[in-house]
Amino acid sequence: MSKSDAFSVFVIMIALTILLGIILSFPIMLLWNYCLVPAVAGTNEITWLQAWGLYVLFNILFKSSSGGSR
């Protein structure tokens, strides 16, 4: 594999990661804006970028970091 092929694969993987993050943050935004905001007084609607940040934060906080399957 040449350097240009490796770079192309790297760029494609980064683009797919960003696209996947956007797709996975959209349901969080919808859940927050249309289910939780009306139910909780004093909360505001969020943008998809804020939902993406919540998705990343939830993955950091709640994803299991252990390699085993215990």
Image: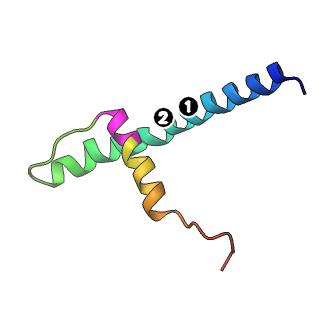
At 30% from the left and 33% from the top, the residue drawn is 47
- Alpha carbon separation for disc pair 1 and 2: 5 Å
Is residue 47 found left or right of 37 in the rendered image? right
Identity of the residue furthest to the front in this view: 3
In the picture of the structure, the residue carrying the numbered disc 1 is: 19
Residue 25 sits in quarter = top left
| Residue 62 location (% of width, % of height) | 46, 64
Provide the secondary structure element on which disc 2 rests. Answer: helix
In the picture of the structure, the residue carrying the numbered disc 2 is: 22
> Looking at the figure, which quarter contains the N terminus?
top right
Say what amino acid the circle numbered 2 marks: Ile
Whether residue 64 is situated above or below residue 53 in the rendered picture: below
Is residue 22 found left or right of 7 in the rendered image? left
Residue 11 sits in quarter = top right
What segment is highlighted magenta in the picture?
A: 47-52
Identity of the residue furthest to the left in this view: 42
| Residue 15 location (% of width, % of height) | 61, 27
Q: Main secondary structure of the magenta part?
A: helix
Is 49 contained in the magenta span? yes
Identity of the residue furthest to the bottom in this view: 70
Provide the secondary structure element on which disc 1 rests. Answer: helix
Asked if disc 1 and disc 2 are in contact, CB closer than 8 Å, the reply is yes
At 56% from the left and 37% from the top, the residue drawn is 20
Say what amino acid the circle numbered 1 marks: Leu
